[in-house]
Amino acid sequence: MSTAPSGWSLRALAQEAHVLPKVARDAAEEGVIDAQHTVETDIVLVRLYGALKRLVWPEERRPANKDQGLRVWEAITIETARAALPDDMHDDTGLFVHQTGCELVSGPGPKALAFFKLAEQPFYYAPLGRWFNELPSQRLLASETSEKADA
C-alpha cells in the first residue's frame, strides 16, 4: 500500500473513515480520491462513498457481484461534498441524498425544509458536519480548545 506525501495511506484513510480498505481502494479507482495525493478531508469522502455504494433505491436492480461504477447521483453527491469541504462545514451540515442528486443543508430551517421536500421519496442523510468534526485535526483542535477553556 503506497503512502501519500501527506502520510495518509489508503488503509489509514479507510480506518479513519470506519470502512474496509477495499472501499478506499475502490474510491481511488473510481476517481473519488487521488491515491497519490491524499488529504485529511478525503476521509469524509471515503466514508460518504462507502455509504453511497451500499444504497439501493426501491425498484432499482443492482447486482452485488457486478462492478457498475459511479451512478450519476453518486457523482453529484460526492462533488457536492467535495465542494463543501472544509469551508462550508458546520456541526449540523448534512447531505440529503436522493435518487436524482442531493441537498446540502446547515441549520434547522433548511434541514426541516429538506425533510418536507423529500417526505414522499426515499432519501439517505449523511451527517457531513459530524464526520468532519471527527477528523483527527478537528479532534485535536477541539481538545486544545477545551484545555484552554479549562485553564
Image: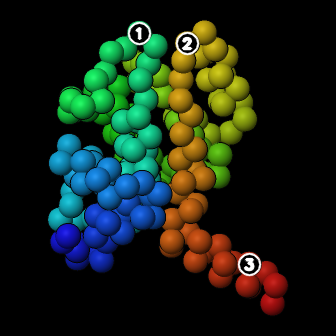
Give residue 122's quadrant in the image.
top right
Callout 2: few (<14), some (14-19), or many (20+) C-alpha neighbours within 10 Å? few
N-terminal-most mark, 1 or 3: 1
Which of the two marks, 1 or 3, is nearer to us in this view? 1
Horizontal side of residue 22 vs 128, given as left or right: left
- The amino acid marked with disc number 1 is Glu
Horizontal side of residue 32 vs 128, given as left or right: left
Q: Residue furthest bottom?
A: 151
* Residue in the foreground of this view, choosing between 12 and 92: 12
Q: Give coordinates of residue 100: x percent, y percent.
A: 40, 18
**Tag of residue 121:** 2
Callout 3: few (<14), some (14-19), or many (20+) C-alpha neighbours within 10 Å? few
Whether residue 33 is visible, yes or no, is no
Mark 3 and mark 2: Cα distance apart in space:
41 Å
Give residue 10's quadrant in the image.
bottom left
Mark 1 and mark 3: Cα distance apart in space:
48 Å
- The amino acid marked with disc number 3 is Ser
Residue 22 vertical position relative to residue 50 in the rendered view, above or below = below
- The amino acid marked with disc number 2 is Gln
Name the residue located 18 percent from the left edge and 48 percent from the top edge: 29
Whether residue 71 is visible, yes or no, is yes
Residue on which the image places disc 1: 59
Residue on which the image places disc 3: 146
Which of the two marks, 2 or 1, is nearer to us in this view? 1
Name the residue located 66 percent from the left edge and 31 percent from the top edge: 111
Q: Quadrant of the C terminus?
A: bottom right
